[in-house]
Amino acid sequence: MILCVLLAVVGLGGVIAESPPKMISCDFGVTESTHEVIETVMETGELNPSHYPAQRAAKVVQHYLNTQYASPYKIFGLHKVIRANAEDVPNSGRKYQLDLSVQEWIEKKIQGECSAEVLFPMEDSHTPPQVKVLSCENILKINTSIQEEAFFQEQLSRPNLLFASNIPDSYGHIAPEHVPFWHLGSIVSSYVMLNESTQETLYNMAQVANVTQQESADSSLLKYEYDVLLHDMVSQDIFAWKVLFTWSPSEGIKVLKMEKGDYPLEQGTTT
């Protein structure tokens, strides 16, 4: 038995769960289905939408959408892979063509279908996957500007710089005032996961370990440093990353620095 993370996905479908993740104990054995997954990773042509190759490529699309369109009040999650196709591109890598449905995670009521292409470069290139969204329904046009501006002004008027840790806590609980910071953590984690994803990974954010607000030289921007824990469902490894970024409703997130850390984090670590 080993410790693992009950992630914000259900099975291989990548569906966002109703509640935050919790730590649970589970046993991962090498089964016949595991061997089947390994053998089908490099299939070409039409793929089974529920198998790992299609799901891994689709999760990369999710991370891309969050880096481009998400906010503390608008997060996108993979709902379902509808169709998937893979082909080898000579001298470039492996390209996946996907039709998928995407759900807005916070309200959980709005869904839309998207078409996208994901190119995983050749292994020796050491570059992140390239994503091209060909079409996406009105889900990307959801307007949360009023909530974002109210949150922004509230944070600007704080008497002290924010520090918070363990979002969610060991019981899966998130204090209401920390929910927007959990969402920000989801977005900045998508920057890391998009950059680190390969055909052999399937990442999700497990926890915001620490969030520290920093003084910003620009009064029109909020500046934060996050320690986030990421879980790779394939290897069952947990990875710690430190991300420094700024945010405002008008500018969105601007990542200034991403740095891999050690896991587990030292107790009492501050950033």
Image: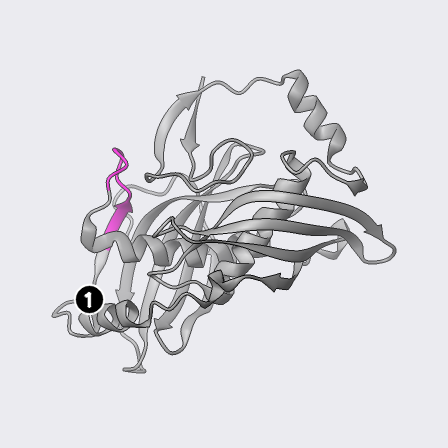
Q: Is residue 171 magenta?
A: yes
Q: Is residue 128 visible?
A: no
Q: Position of residue 195 (x, y in %)?
A: 58, 56
Q: Position of residue 47 (x, y in %)?
A: 73, 38
Mark 1 Cα-neighbour bin, 10 Å: few <14, some 14–19, many ≥20: few
Nearer to the camera, 113 or 166: 113
Outermost left residue = 159
How many numbered discs? 1
Residue type indicated by callout 1: Leu
Range covered by the magenta-colored residues: 164-173
Image quadrant holding the C terminus, namely bottom left
- Above or below residue 66? Residue 203 is above
Prevailing SS of the magenta stretch: loop
Q: Is residue 33 magenta?
A: no
Nearer to the camera, 172 or 14: 14
- The structure residue drawn at horizontal position 29% and vertical position 69%, both measured from the top left corner, is 148
- Above or below residue 26? Residue 237 is below
- The structure residue drawn at horizontal position 24% and vertical position 68%, both measured from the top left corner, is 151
- Above or below residue 64? Residue 155 is below
Nearer to the camera, 257 or 109: 109
- The structure residue drawn at horizontal position 51% and vertical position 47%, both measured from the top left corner, is 78
Outermost right residue = 90
Q: Is residue 103 visible?
A: yes
Q: Is residue 7 left or right of residue 107?
A: right
Q: Which residue is mark 1?
A: 161
Q: Is residue 88 left or right of residue 68?
A: right
- The structure residue drawn at horizontal position 56% and vertical position 34%, both measured from the top left corner, is 12
Q: Position of residue 54 (x, y in %)?
A: 66, 42
Q: Position of residue 144 (x, y in %)?
A: 34, 67
